[in-house]
Amino acid sequence: MDPTTLEGFLPRLSQTLEELELLYFQFCLRCTADGVPESPNFFRDHTQYPAVRSLTIYRFDGPPLLDRLQYLFPALDGTLHVMSDSQINPHAREAIRAANRRAQGGSPSHAWKKLDRVVCGPGMLHTLALRCPIRHVMLEQAHGDNDEKTLRYAAAADTLRENPVQRLKLTLACGRGMFDGIFTQELAGTLTHLTLCLVHDNFHTRTESDTAAATQPLWDFLLSAMIPALQPLHNVTHLRVVIHCKLYRRPRPSLSGLDYADSSISSSGSDSDSKKLTDADAIPAPARDYSREFMDAIRGGPAFDFDHGTGTAASLARALPSTQYVFLMTGGNVVDRVQAPQTWRSSERWSVSRGWRVASLSAGPQAGNTHPSPNGGRDGDGDPPGPRALVELQGDVADTIIKNEELSLSQTDEVSPCVRVLYPSAMVLAGALANDRTDAENDCDNGG
């Protein structure tokens, strides 16, 4: 769908439409050599929608041109949500980014003044090059090979350095260098709320050489990488860490049928027709062991060592002296390849979540707080520096704070093939997201 198509039915709502969702959207079929569409009559031929405050585009086909978006939706100040990155070559991406920066220069009358929330991939955030104040950015997981993902996150980090935000949700694939350059000094100066979603799967660990260098268990590596990466964030008061492991099991023919490896995985919660577990998995044994150990660690091992002095939550709280609340959620999914080609079946899924208030040992609850205490009172957000302890949040208090403080995952996280196990009851946007989910699974199949 393009703006010309919208002219056929949407202009009658132009003065009243406040929220708009578009499945596919593109500005122009013809582009110049630098990737910027040629449409000299665009601003003369298309209706504006001055009442639209929030815009969702599920798939952007072609370049995301900010001058056209700002023209069509001049009053946008709520949510801008782009659910898939444009497939643009690097040269064209930089040209489009430059065009988008120019579109915000010189104080054009239709330039956006502010945005409450931007939800997109790291490549899209970089290409849009938004310069208006943004309160909350939700960055989705990048796809592609490792080099491409690294470049996209680095580009997004540059964007957040130029335009730092107060709230950030960041989804990353677990791996070496995953935090490199993400948390800049500029971002550390403004960031108060961080939701960190870390995802691991064994789809990409195809050969023994991939795991030969993995001399450290993944959970130990993850914690040792995460703690120093978070330490510069001296203003963060609310931290939520979500860790997910997806374990793929591929069978190969045997005399007894299709058998699966990973016999160490518990069968509790599995489908009643689960296959017999053997060592017949097509994934190399070191990769299986590496991922299985990580699954065990986040299910009930060291990830959920809740000793208030030395446990994971305590380590996170010590890394961030300004932290007032810490939330930790872990989840896993075991997925089997069944006999039909390219078909997968989820045979086990689980998730565990807990939260804590970081309390001062030298002072009682302070006035002026906004969060309920586990016992029904109010706990202070202003505990002075000094010895601190973790006070576990009981009942639905943690969920309430997560909601009120906007520490939730994005819609894409909740329905993504890699993360949706954490929210198995989430409504799937069947029509709108069918192609995106298929593409995501294909990316996994292709090592993307």
Image (cartoon, rainbow, N blue to C red):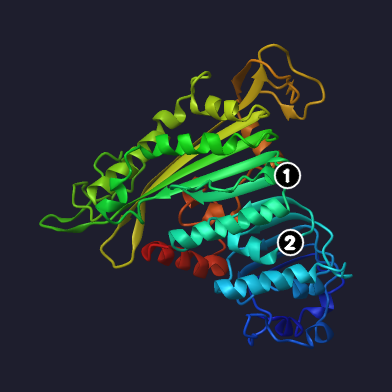
The circle on residue 53 is: none
> In the figure, 227 relative to 165: above or below?
above
Q: Quadrant of residue 114?
A: bottom right
Q: Residue 351: image x %, image y %?
A: 47, 40
Q: Residue 318: image x %, image y %?
A: 58, 25
Work out whether residue 33 can be spotted. yes
334 vs 275, nearest the viewer: 334
Q: Residue 32: image x %, image y %?
A: 65, 86
The residue depicted at 79 percent of the width and 54 percent of the height is 133
> In the figure, 172 relative to 366: above or below?
below
Left or right: residue 151 versus residue 406 is left
The residue depicted at 53 percent of the width and 34 percent of the height is 227
Q: Element under label 1?
A: loop
Type of amino acid at the residue the image marks with label 2: Leu
The residue depicted at 62 percent of the width and 64 percent of the height is 124
Q: Element under label 2?
A: loop
Q: Residue 5: image x %, image y %?
A: 71, 84
Residue located beneath label 1 in the image: 166
186 vs 320, nearest the viewer: 186
> In the figure, 47 relative to 336: above or below?
below
Q: Quadrant of the C terminus?
A: bottom left
Label 1 or label 2, whichever comes before in sequence order = 2
197 vs 271, nearest the viewer: 197
248 vs 258, nearest the viewer: 248
Count of residue discs: 2
The circle on residue 130 is: 2
Neighbor class of circle 2 (other Cα within 10 Å; few <14, some 14-19, many 20+) is: many
Extreme residue in the left direction: 255
